[in-house]
C-alpha cells in the first residue's frame, strides 16, 4: 500500500505543472539539458521579483487585449491544462487542440484571402514540432516547422495516413478547405474554420512518450504505473504544452 509521503511527493509536482515531460525528467534525476535554463533568469536584486511579476502581468494583459481586438471579448481562448491554443498571423488565425474532446479547430478572421490564411494555419498546426520550448503560446509569433510534429499519429489525413511531412500537410490542408470548410460569425466578423477529429486512441499515442519515465518512477517509489498514468491524464490529458490554470508562484 502507498504511504502518504510517497503519494504526496509524487502528486505535488504533477499538480503544479501538468505532465511536462521536461519537468518530470527533472524530478527523476534524468540529465535533460533544458531543465536548467530557468535558473539563469532568477532575480538577484531586492525587489526584482516584484518587477518581474508585474512585467509578466502586463505581458498577459497585452496578450489578452490583442486577442480581443481580433476576436472580441467573448472569443478569448488561451492554452490550459488539457487544451493547446496558438495564435499566428498577427492574431488573425488560431488553432485549438482540445485533448479532452479529441478535436482540433483551426480558424481565421482574416478580412482578406481568408482561405489562404486558413490554409497556412492548418499546415502550421499539423507540423508544429514536439518541442514546447520552441513555441510561444502567449504571442502570435511564428513557429519554426522542423522536427517531428507533436500531433504525429494523433491525426490522420483523408487517406488515413499520419502527417509528418510538409507535402502531406499541404495536401491535407487543400482537402479540408475544399471539403470541410465552415463559417460562423465572430464579433461581427466572418470566421472561416475547419474541425479535425483526432484518432480514437490519441490518449494512448501521447502516453507512449512517457512510458520510460513512468516505469522508472513506479519502480523507484513503489507507485503503480496505472495510478501514475491516471494522474497525468486527469491533470493534463498528456498535453505536452499544458499550462496551469492557477497563478502559482515560485
Image (cartoon, helix red, strand yellow):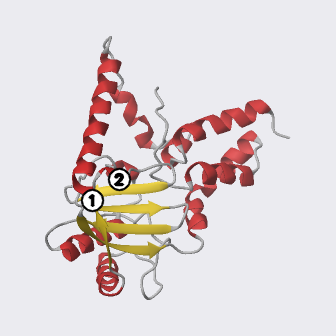
Residue at (34%, 82%) from the top-left corner? 176
Residue at (50%, 41%) from the top-left corner? 31
Q: Residue 250 in the image: x percent, y percent? A: 46, 26
Q: Residue 92 in the image: x percent, y percent? A: 22, 60
Residue at (55%, 59%) from the top-left corner? 209
Q: Residue furthest top?
A: 46
Residue 74, labelled with which disc?
2
Mark with earlier residue (2, 1): 2
- Of the pair 146 and 54, the residue shown nearer to us: 54
Q: Is residue 133 left or right of residue 250?
A: left
- Per the image, the residue denoted by label 1 is 187
Regarding mark 1 in the picture, which secondary structure is present there?
A: loop
> Tag 2: Cα neighbours inside 10 Å, few (<14), some, or many (≥20)?
few
- Of the pair 201 and 104, the residue shown nearer to us: 104
- Of the pair 46 and 113, the residue shown nearer to us: 113
Q: Is residue 3 left or right of residue 55?
A: right
Q: Residue 169 in the image: x percent, y percent? A: 33, 77
Amino acid at each position: 500500500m502507498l504511504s502518504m509521503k510517497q503519494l504526496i511527493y509524487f502528486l505535488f509536482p504533477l499538480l503544479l505543472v501538468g505532465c511536462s515531460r521536461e519537468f518530470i525528467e527533472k524530478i527523476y534525476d534524468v540529465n535533460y539539458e533544458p531543465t536548467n535554463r530557468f535558473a539563469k533568469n532568477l532575480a538577484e536584486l531586492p525587489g526584482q521579483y516584484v518587477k518581474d511579476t508585474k512585467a509578466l502581468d502586463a505581458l498577459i494583459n497585452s496578450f489578452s487585449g490583442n486577442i480581443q481586438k481580433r476576436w472580441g471579448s467573448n472569443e478569448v481562448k488561451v492554452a490550459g491544462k488539457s487544451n493547446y491554443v496558438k495564435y499566428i498571423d498577427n492574431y488573425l488565425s488560431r488553432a485549438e487542440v482540445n485533448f479532452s474532446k479529441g478535436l482540433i479547430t483551426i480558424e481565421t478572421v482574416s478580412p482578406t484571402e481568408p482561405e489562404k490564411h486558413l490554409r497556412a494555419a492548418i499546415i502550421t498546426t499539423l507540423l508544429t514540432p514536439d518541442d514546447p520550448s520552441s513555441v510561444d503560446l502567449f504571442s502570435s509569433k511564428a513557429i519554426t516547422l522542423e522536427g517531428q510534429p507533436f500531433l504525429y499519429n494523433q491525426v490522420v489525413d483523408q487517406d488515413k495516413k499520419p502527417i509528418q511531412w510538409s507535402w502531406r500537410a499541404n495536401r491535407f490542408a487543400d482537402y479540408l478547405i475544399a471539403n470541410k470548410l465552415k463559417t460562423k460569425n465572430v464579433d461581427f466578423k466572418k470566421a472561416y474554420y475547419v474541425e479535425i477529429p483526432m484518432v480514437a486512441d490519441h490518449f494512448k499515442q501521447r502516453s507512449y512518450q512517457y512510458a520510460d519515465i513512468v516505469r522508472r518512477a513506479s519502480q523507484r517509489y513503489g507507485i503503480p504505473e496505472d495510478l501514475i498514468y491516471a494522474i497525468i491524464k486527469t491533470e493534463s490529458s498528456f498535453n505536452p504544452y499544458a499550462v496551469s490554470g492557477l497563478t502559482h508562484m515560485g
